[in-house]
Amino acid sequence: MAASAPSTPQQQDEDVVGKAYDHRLMRRLLTYLRPFRLQVALSLIAIALKAFADVMGPFLPMIAVDLYMTHSLQADHAWVARYLSANAVTGISEVAAIYLGSLLFSYLLEFFQTYLMQWTGQKVMYDLRSQIFRHLQQMHVAFFDRNPAGRLVTRVTSDVDALNEMFTSGVVSIFEDVLVLAGIVLVMLRMSWWLALIAFAVLPFILLVTNIFRKHVRESYRRIRVAIARINSFLQEHVSGMSVVQLFNREQRAYKDFEVVNRQHMDAFKDAILAYAIYYPVIELLSSIAIALVVWFGGRSVLLHAPPNISPAVTGAVTLGVLVAFIQYAQRFFRPIQDLSEKYNILQAAMAASERIFKLLDTPSEIVSPASPSKGDDSGSIEFRNVWFTYQRLDAATQTQIEHGTFVDDGSIEWILRDVSFSIAPDEVAAIVGHTGAGKTTLTNLMMRFYDIQPGSILIDGVDVRACDLNTLRKRFAVVLQDPFLFTGTIASNIRLGSDTITQQQIEQTADEVNVGDFIRSLPRAFDEPVRERGNTLSTGQKQLISFARALAANPRILILDEATSSVDTDTETRIRSALRRMVTGRTSVIIAHRLSTIQQADRILVMHKGQLRETGTHQELLAQRGLYWKLYQLQYKDQELAGIVPEAVGLPTS
Ligand SMILES: Nc1ncnc2c1ncn2[C@@H]1O[C@H](COP(=O)(O)OP(=O)(O)OP(=O)(O)O)[C@@H](O)[C@H]1O
Ligand SMILES: [Mg+2]
């Protein structure tokens, strides 16, 4: 057995061993079946009929034996004789034909039922996956900061699969098993109650063995789930970071780490298999004992025409036909019991999966559009009023304190923005500069309301972002990021991301406007060049160029460039800078840049430092202030000087 590994966040979610049946969860799950009421009803009817056919099966051989061979048909069953031929040979053929017919009928029902339920299960899975994905899309950005992608993927894939298994094979066959069991018990008791009780004598042992088996398998399944979650997250991390693994020669180490989780999975599975390998033969053995008891006691009763050791006055002797039927019933009786214990596991896994899925679906988005959104003045103005912001989750008490203005800053909150106020007029070009981690990107995230601020307000078009409709608000913006994200498709489809109505001509035009048309046309298939996942086949600079075209094609009111030219060469940057002038005319623009040369032309420069807005003004004004901006400028200027000086200093030619 594998030693228990240290607990990981993944483990906790998959670790839950829920109840096998939870009324609340089940009721909610059944709501997904509601649109398929007819299909479910039909397959339940099919199951009931099949269960009836299964229970009645052994009844026919009994009739054949008692009516035609031993002529000792029980009075109870005398009515059957009226429907069958008096001639023994014809009669037996008739019974055989009915037996065959009932088998065919039962197989047909099984086909019908399986097809219907699988069909319904697939529809339910489809609905559920759509619902989860739609929900994920509505979630606020902070939610994805906290929930690793791998785990969310598991919700849509394997957890939904577990539910499907329950719908298609679990619940339905439990229903069937219970019906068959109940039917067989009733028929056996009616045919000969004392022989039935003898056959049932092994039941307590079966219950005991099943109970032990269930506990073992449940534990193994839990370990399997945990191991699968670990293998998934390990693989995901190492496959996407394979070049780093290889660069640092971590293959051996990574292989060893993988071996540990891989082994945990195998060991857990081996334990489960061992449990099954023991359980099934033990149940077979017990059912054989039951059959042996039936043959022994029943056989004696047939021979002696009296039940052994029991007064014949109380009970009747069994006929040969009843004995034959009993042997068949005893065989059929234990199969559903075996199945039930397996179905129990399916049910349990499904309950745990549904608990996780519903927990996700019940997590509300913390950022939603207001019920009656306000309309802005369409000007494209941006205003921050005393904005305070932290990425931390604040508890309800702090939240109310802040709302009522009674909050005292005791340093327990790590503020990313502190009392930031500024306004950017319509069509103005504003630049934000500052050290790494100063809060520049955070400022732009807040404008699009990816996060909610704590005290203060942010106004776009003169309206608080919290009063705006989210779709309308975000439609006002286009952003080019430092690490641009491209989707699978073509270059054209990536440029067209903002709207489907953008024509091919517009795409080419915008590409030319930002000076990337030539580059795109130099690709083998130009605008139809396929883009692989995340645009991995393109260089970061090329991706930035494409996202420039994308931003411009969307024709936004407000343009945000966050370190948008950080990955392109000087030549390309110069070309983009000349394009920039065209890009920013007629719209409000916010440009974040570390290279101060990019932003000297800005109407206004905001200097951020440790979450505070320290200086604002034009390039010249700020230089004259001789403050932070001046220092930043000096540093970069000195760098350039240094770059010129160094070759000389070490005696190398300067050209
Ligand atoms: N999603 C997040 N969750 C928690 N903290 C964050 C998150 N994003 C950023 N931060 C923190 O907020 C601070 C400001 O980050 P921000 O990205 O705004 O900096 P920046 O000025 O854009 O820096 P850079 O120039 O490196 O891009 C940093 O200290 C960072 O650690
Ligand atoms: Mg940033």
Image (cartoon, helix red, strand yellow):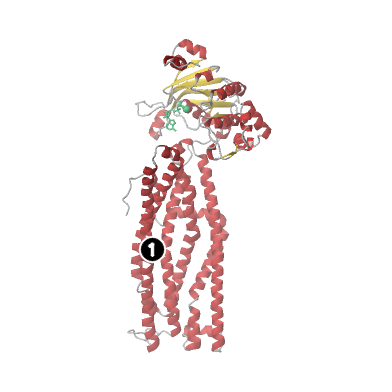
> Which residue in the structure is indicated by mark 1?
276
Residue 653, given in percent of the width and then of the height, sits at 47, 16
Q: Residue at x 49, y 62 (%)?
A: 172
Residue 487, given in percent of the width and then of the height, sits at 56, 38
Q: Residue at x 50, y 76 (%)?
A: 57
Q: Residue 348 is drawn in which quadrant?
A: bottom left
307 left or right, relative to 379: left
Q: Nearer the viewer, residue 618 or 395?
A: 618
Q: Residue at x 44, y 75 (%)?
A: 329
Circle 1: is it few (<14), some (14-19), or many (20+) Cα within 10 Å? some
Q: Secondary structure at mark 1?
A: helix
Viewport quadrant of the N terminus: bottom left
On screen, residue 196 above or below 604: below
On screen, residue 579 above or below 527: above
Whether residue 325 can be seen here? yes
Q: Residue furthest right?
A: 505
612 left or right, relative to 545: left
Residue 524, given in percent of the width and then of the height, sits at 62, 36
Q: Residue 588 is drawn in which quadrant?
A: top right
On screen, residue 143 above or below 456: below
Under mark 1, the amino acid is: Tyr
